[in-house]
Structures are given as C-alpha cells and as structure tokens.
Image (spheres, rainbow, N blue to C red):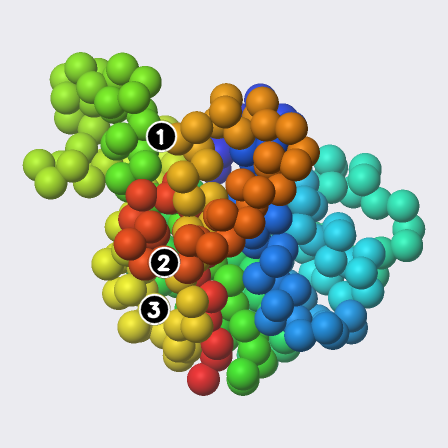
C-alpha cells in the first residue's frame, strides 16, 4: 500500500481524466454503465476503488444510491471535498480484497474500475473479482477494468525508447509479458488471463470492451482535436471498441459480467 499511496498522493488523477485522451475511457465506461442501468435512477451501486469519485459522484447525482469504497486516504479526502450534499453516497475506506462488511446479493451493480490495476497475483485478482460478484444481486452487473500488457510493451518499451531499460532490468518474461511488482504500481494482463478469471466466478461475460482503444497511441493528436473532430473520433471509437481484434492492444479494457 505504501507504493500505491505515495503514487496517488503525488499525481492529479482528475487532470488526466479531464484531458481529451483521458475522457475517452471515462465517456466509454459511463456509456456502458448507463446502458446496463437501463434507465434506472435508483440503483444500488458499489464502486470498489472509487478513487477521487470520477464515477461515483455523477452516478450519485443522477439518483443512484452509491457506496464508494476507496483504499487511499488522500483520494477519499479529495472525493469528499467534491460533494455538495445533493448526492446519496456513502464514502468509506476499504480494500477490494475484503468486502465482508457487505452481505451477499446487496448491489444492483458493482464497479471495480481501478483495483485490478494494482493487484499482482492471480489469487488476489480472483479474490477481488469473487468478492465483487458475491455482493452483487443475482442478475446484477459487474464491471471490472484492466491494464493491458501489449499497450505497455508497445508504448513504453518501443515508442518511448525504454527498450534497453526493459531488457537490462528483466522487466518482462521471455514471452514479453510484463513482470509487475508493487513498486511498479500497475499490473498488466492479457485477454486470456481475464478469460480465466471470469471462468472461475459465478458470472457470465456480456461484453469485453476496449475502453480507450487506439487513443493512448495518439494522445497529442487527440488532445489537439477541436470539439467536432473529437466527436467524430468518439463515433469511430464506439464503432470499434467491441471488436475483439482491438482488445489486446487497448491500454484499458472493461469486462462486463452478469451474476448467475
């Protein structure tokens, strides 16, 4: 937790999400959240790893009853500082690996949009996903977001010129899978690892989405777009984000499950 807390104490996560390239992931995720809320404005939603409230707060302001669980105290302080009193939201500190404070079958929708980024073993990822499924009502929806391996290799090692560092420090396995530890902050996965996690829980996949697709490969271009061009980019992005040939090279993916 020390590495994670130090990281989030030192960055402005909201600033990233408000950039044009950062907004693609946010807009995409909210699009699918709204799709599976099916017009409900009174849903019981749990966000595990709520960060600074980028998703929890607007969902609460739309009328959903939101429980925002966050590990990092700094993020909780920022989240609470944004509230204006109109939201039905319960903010608490907690860990994605232990949702024992919540009973089985409690929430209509459970969002796990950050924790998988920072869990480094298959057992921990499975524990977090299993807990999210457990507390979700039968037929309810679970969203789990992941950071993808190939985007990291392509961008960090090759595009940004860190190949020598990657090789000298043995930062990947022979098959080019990133070797991540807590000091690295982020854990990278491949689609087959997400498939395997899904197969081990009491839920079925609805969709696997490339939530930012090609956007992070062309950040400067995206950020310089005028509003009309950016709108067209989003149209194009939505036309390809469910294509399974795009998933593995997206920076982030969104796995959408229904509890059985």
Q: Split into 4 quadrants, where in the image is the C terminus?
A: bottom left
Return the residue nearer the eye: 122 or 219: 219
Taking the image as drawn, is residue 207 in sight?
Answer: yes
Disc 3 residue crowd, few under 14, some 14–19, many 20+, Cα 10 Å: some
- The residue pinned by badge 3 equals 198
Q: Residue at the location (59% across, 27% down)?
A: 225
- How packed mark 2 is, by other alpha carbons closer than 10 Å (few <14, some 14-19, many 20 or more), is few
Residue 2 in sight here: no
Q: Residues within 10 Å of mark 1 (few under 14, many from 20)?
A: few
Q: Residue furthest right?
A: 85
Mark nearest the camera among 2 and 3 is 2
Circle 2 SS class: loop
The image shows residue 86, relative to residue 7, as above or below, that is below
Say which residue appears at 35% left-offset and 30% top-offset: 184
Marks 3 and 1, how far apart in space?
25 Å
Q: Closer to the N terminus: mark 2 or mark 3?
A: 3
67 on left or right of 131: right
Q: Which residue is mark 2?
A: 243
Comes first in the chain, label 3 or label 1: 1
The Cα–Cα distance between marks 2 and 3, rounded to whole angstroms, is 19 Å
């Amino acid at each position: 937790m020390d590495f994670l807390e130090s990281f989030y104490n030192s960055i402005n996560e909201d600033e990233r999400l408000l950039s044009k390239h950062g907004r693609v992931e946010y807009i995409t995720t909210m699009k699918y959240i709204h799709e599976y809320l099916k017009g409900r404005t009174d849903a019981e939603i749990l966000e595990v790893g709520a960060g600074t409230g980028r998703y929890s707060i607007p969902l609460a302001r739309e009328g959903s009853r939101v429980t925002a669980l966050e590990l990092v105290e700094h993020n909780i302080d920022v989240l609470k500082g944004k509230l204006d009193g109109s939201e039905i939201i319960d903010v608490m500190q907690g860990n994605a690996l232990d949702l024992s404070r919540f009973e089985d079958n409690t929430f209509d929708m459970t969002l796990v949009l950050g924790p998988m980024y920072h869990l480094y073993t298959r057992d921990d990822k499975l524990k977090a996903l299993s807990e999210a499924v457990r507390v979700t009502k039968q037929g309810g929806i679970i969203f789990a977001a992941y950071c993808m391996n190939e985007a990291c290799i392509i961008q960090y090692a090759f595009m940004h010129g860190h190949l020598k560092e990657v090789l000298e420090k043995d930062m990947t396995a022979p098959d080019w899978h990133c070797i991540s530890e807590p000091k690295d902050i982020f854990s990278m996965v491949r689609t087959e690892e997400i498939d395997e996690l899904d197969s081990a829980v009491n839920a079925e996949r609805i969709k696997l989405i490339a939530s930012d697709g090609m956007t992070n490969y062309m950040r400067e271009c995206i950020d310089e777009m005028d509003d009309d061009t950016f709108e067209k980019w989003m149209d194009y992005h939505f036309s390809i984000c469910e294509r399974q040939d795009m998933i593995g090279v997206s920076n982030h993916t969104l796995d959408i499950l229904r509890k059985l």
